[in-house]
Image (cartoon, coloured by chain):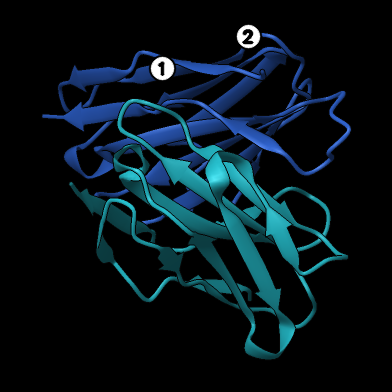
Amino acid sequence: GAVVSQHPSRVICKSGTSVKIECRSLDFQATTMFWYRQFPKQSLMLMATSNEGSKATYEQGVEKDKFLINHASLTLSTLTVTSAHPEDSSFYICSARDHAAHSYNEQFFGPGTRLTVL
Amino acid sequence: AQSVTQPDIHITVSEGASLELRCNYSYGATPYLFWYVQSPGQGLQLLLKYFSGDTLVQGIKGFEAEFKRSQSSFNLRKPSVHWSDAAEYFCAVEKGGGNKLTFGTGTQLKVEL
């Protein structure tokens, strides 16, 4: 089945540093990937839509300069949290849509990355 | 704007008992509807989806859901719960096209042995 991986699974960093999170589709090509943020005991909030070879589309209220997204290939998208602060601590989840899927709407989700900013 | 409501934050059922998780949505037209399950350390897994047609949808792991337009609901059911079903369940909706999902706040299911 379609598998999406994320690396790292958890990261702890100091305030002011930048952190890069990778999202990979392992056995399919993904023209579109999505980045979500999940706070404890809360829902997933869509941050941005990442399209291969073009700029990401950010949801209202998401700082594009804070959360840099790069989708350089059909199997890899990266999210870089720049100058991270404690309020950026969260669970970040990516998903990928199978380029060749018969079911147009199905997204496959990664296991998530727990970011803790000290 | 579309929204999704899962009224039950926590539900506890005994193993072997039936289960119903509630989901209500707010959207002008019929959206695409999904149920996902999230287990610790694993990505969200799609249980089932509804786009159109038969309003009773069968999914994986013995789950089913029924779309009721008059109630704007898409409740998830399982006739007999297994201990391994303990997890967080999310209802999600998508306005046609674009793949942008709006998730409910989730229901944490606990299964008592």
Q: Colour of chain A?
A: blue
Give the residue at mark 2.
Answer: A26
Q: Please identify the quarter of the rendering in which residue B38 is found.
A: top left
Near mark 1 (Cα within 10 A), the count class, few <14, some 14-19 or many ≥20, is some
Element at badge 2? loop
Left or right position of B45 against A21: right
Q: Chain of mark 1?
A: A
- Mark 1 falls on what kind of element? strand
Q: Is residue B20 left or right of residue B50?
A: left
> Along the polypeptide, which appears first: circle 1 or circle 2?
1
Chain identifier matching the cyan colour in the rendered picture:
B
Residue that label 1 marks: A20
Q: Can you say which quadrant of the picture contains the N terminus of chain A?
A: top right
Q: Nearer the viewer, residue B9 or B103?
A: B9
Q: Is residue A65 left or right of residue A11?
A: right
Three-letter code, disc 2: Leu
Q: Is residue B18 above or below residue B37?
A: below
Please report, as a chain letter, where disc 2 is located. A
In the rendering, at what x and y percent does residue A73 appear? 72, 11
Q: Position of residue B99 (x, y in %)?
A: 73, 48
Name the residue located 61 percent from the left edge and 57 percent from the top edge: B64
Quarter of the view holding residue A24: top right
Q: Are marks 1 and 2 on the same chain?
A: yes
Q: Nearer the viewer, residue B15 or B52?
A: B15
Foreground residue among A65 and B44: B44
**Numbered tag placed on residue A96 in the rendering:** none
